Amino acid sequence: MINYRPKYKSFLVLLVLVVVNSCIEPFQATFVDFESALVIEATITNELKTQQVVLSRSYEFDADGPTAETGARVMVIGGGTTYNFIEGDNGIYFSDQQFAAQQGVEYNLQITTSDGRNYGSDNTQLTAATSLDEVKAERITNDLGEEGMAILVDSFDSTGNSVNYRYEYAETYRVIAPTWSPVSLIGDPENSLSCLVLKVNNETDERICYPTSFSNSIILNTTDNLDEDRVSNFMVRFINRDNYIISHRYSILVRQYVMSNESYNFFETLNELSGSESLFSQTQPGFLQGNVFSADNEEERVLGYFDVASVDEKRLFFNYDDFFPGEDLPPYVDPCNPSSPVLANMGGCVLRPIIESGAGVYFLDTDEPGINEGPYQIVPRVCGDCKVLGPPEVPDFWME
């Protein structure tokens, strides 16, 4: 089972903008009244699994990124049971036992940070359960005139109780390093000061790997304006045909969350505020209030949402040839242009440091080296060792 993180991180800069105390007229990169707010990301689901809560601190526009909130005590309370969470890495807290949210039970989140501040959430109940009926792939041309693959979903709730949906996905794809070689170069093991490199059997670089990447945007859909609670051909992902990730075999796991009206409105507003026009407009929209709060100070601003949602998921596989038979593969992630560095020049060793730093790997011998060329052609590591992109192990779920 893949652990998913709610997708707030790409919106943190925006949230910092809306928590400043004074109006901002022209946009500036420095915020004198910056307020570091606790950011809470938590979606408890009806899956029997180790649930998770993510805690961090908002950050200024020019900062490197959010700071994990460490050393906190985290609990979810529901139905007379307290579920304690244990801290992992990067501010992610995991429940110390597997549990699944139950219908008709009210859940709330309680947090005590390392400095003794207390935070909580409104009571929240599990949403109605709706199956994700189908995940399918179609070759399309989108509204921008780009050709590629659309990942589409269908679902239907005959009771009409679901209505609001949020989607996440994890995509895994087979990558084949285009210039992998069974031969590798190493520096002369007998002399660390020598500029000599030796050809050996390649026992370190991988030709086939299976990277995984996750959705990083808020994907919402509602059937509120339709005659029935039916999701039909809703596109959760578009992949341009020139994207190397579909070059061979591609898989996507789509997860459909059923949301309450309150949760949907929060994420919809967050999504709207993330647009560039809202982000840099002179009229700031004000603080976006979720269902989390400070239990000690009602004036303290807390960002995020505690959601309790029903979820269903389905996985899809396809090959490039299934939709583009006989057509050229998409370009690789790197053009893989070879070069032939000299072994040494007046400044010292040239090729050996490139090899030993991992910047380049062996491709071919140079047939007739020029004046400023060495005996070996090398390419960027990503071209001859796909581990740069992802692990070589075949995932447990993988199907041919």
Image: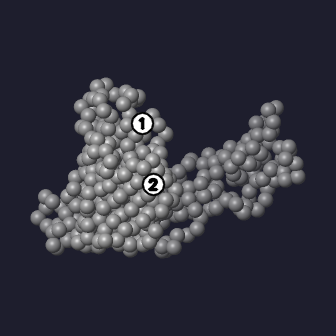
Q: Pick the residue in front: 287 or 269.
A: 287
Q: Can you give x and y, in whole percent of width and height, for residue 282 in the image?
A: 26, 29
The furthest residue to the left: 227
Q: Can you give x and y, in whole percent of width and height, for residue 158 in the image?
A: 16, 73
The amino acid sitting under disc 2 is Ala
Frontmost of labels 1 and 2 is 2
The label number, if any, that marks residue 60 in the structure image: 1
Residue at point 45%, 34% (across, down): 62
Location of residue 4 with respect to 279 vertically, above or below: below
Location of residue 330 with respect to 315 vertically, above or below: above
Q: Can you give x and y, in whole percent of width and height, for residue 379 in the image?
A: 66, 48
Estimate the spatial distance between the alpha carbons at disc 1 and disc 2, rounded to whole Å: 22 Å
Is residue 148 shown to the viewer in this render? no
Dot placed on the residue nearer the N-terminal end, 1 or 2: 1
Q: Pick the residue in front: 260 or 244.
A: 260
Residue behind mark 2? 72
**Figure quadrant of residue 200:** bottom right
Residue at point 38%, 43% (across, down): 37
For the N terminus, which image quadrant?
A: bottom left
Q: Can you give x and y, in whole percent of width and height, for residue 325 in the image?
A: 43, 65
Residue at point 47%, 45% (across, down): 67
Q: Pick the residue in front: 372 or 341.
A: 341
**Left or right position of 58 against 229:** right
Category of crowding for the residue at label 1, using alpha-carbon neighbours closer than 10 angstroms: few (below 14), some (14–19), many (at least 20): many
Residue at point 31%, 68% (across, down): 78
Category of crowding for the residue at label 2, using alpha-carbon neighbours closer than 10 angstroms: few (below 14), some (14–19), many (at least 20): many
The amino acid sitting under disc 1 is Glu
